[in-house]
Image (tube, rainbow, N blue to C red):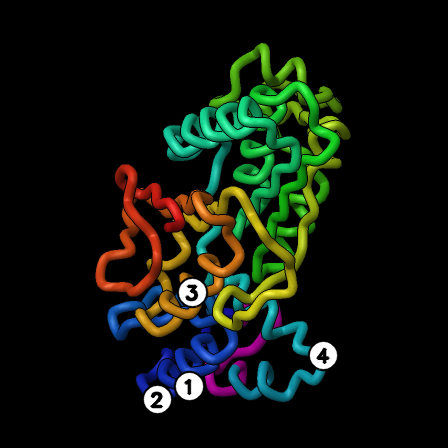
Amino acid sequence: MNGYGSLNEKTFRQFSELIYNEAGIHLAEHKQALVSARLGKRMRKLRINDFEDYYRYVQEDQSRAELSQLLDAISTNVTFFYREPDHFEVLGSMVKKWHSEGQRRFRVWCAAASTGEEPYTIALTLAEALDDLRDVKILGTDISTTVLETARRGEYSSKKLQKISKKLAGRYFTPMGGKGDDRIFRVRDEIKNMITFSWLNLSTPPFPMRGPLDVIFCRNVMIYFDNAVRQRLLDEMHRLLKPGGYLMVGHAESLSGLLGGFRSVRPSVYIKQ
């Protein structure tokens, strides 16, 4: 395939409606070029030349496998260990406080797990903060089945581990081979076993998991939703959190303009009232 047709406004609107209905992701008009580029890569793999043909292909796929591929292409999966590190400092200090008050059961939800770096960072933080991990559970969810497969493997290159201290890397990762930046490390089972990875569409609450949760990480996700989807998601997170539980959002995000029983304790960190 040497090229593909342009994405016209009508077909862009069709894709936008499909993506919004399936994932709650709002695509503004200025995103048309980005959508064209990302879908074009997928179309080249399938040897489909026309965006309208690709739209029909997605719609006619009874297995919904291509819909999953479409959402993977549109979703942004930028992540790394200890991204926005102040959130993990808050997490560590809060679980230590709760532990000192007698709490032994801890539940944390990472709403957008991506390829696993964020939930594994949560697990490392809890492992360092607590001496008893028997009743510590982390749920990592994502709408992309592809990134969840990577997360479940828990294998990362040495380049990916640059934000992790040598002490923590030696304690919680096993070298698997390779050289230089391509050297592979696997997360050890004691950390892996703390996490359950599961597919979830954040735009369609209520969710099947049970509360109460101590902390929810929902970072750099709500920026892709409109206020209606954000409000539904926020209401569900409020329902699942324990009173006094914490919600972490991305540094570029805010709950401003949304209704909800949360109080800001610092930028991008909220507590359930």
Front residue (pair 105, 187): 105
Near mark 3 (Cα within 10 A), the count class, few <14, some 14-19 or many ≥20, is some
Q: Return the residue at label 2.
A: 10
Q: Distance between the residues labelled 4 and 1?
A: 20 Å
Q: How far apart are marks 4 and 2 (CA)?
A: 25 Å
Three-letter code for the amino acid on which mark 2 is drawn: Lys
Tell which tag, 4 or 3, sits nearer the viewer: 3
SS type, badge 2: helix
Q: Return the residue at label 1.
A: 14
Query: How far from the left and from the top, in percent, is residue 252?
Result: 28, 47
Q: Distance between the residues labelled 2 and 1?
A: 6 Å
Which numbered disc covers residue 235? 3
Three-letter code for the amino acid on which mark 3 is drawn: Asp
N-terminal of the two: label 2 or label 3?
Answer: 2
Q: Looking at the image, do the residues carrying marks 2 and 3 touch, with CB atoms under 8 Å apart?
A: no
Q: How many labels does the image show?
A: 4
The magenta-colored residue range is 41-54
Rendering quarter of residue 121: top right
Three-letter code for the amino acid on which mark 4 is drawn: Ser
Residue 186 in view of the camera: no
Q: Looking at the image, do the residues carrying marks 2 and 1 touch, with CB atoms under 8 Å apart?
A: yes
N-terminal of the two: label 4 or label 2?
Answer: 2
Which numbered disc covers residue 191? none
Q: Residue drawn 50% across and 52% down? A: 241
Relative to 223, is 179 on the left or the right?
right
Query: How far from the left and from the top, in percent, is residue 36?
Result: 39, 70
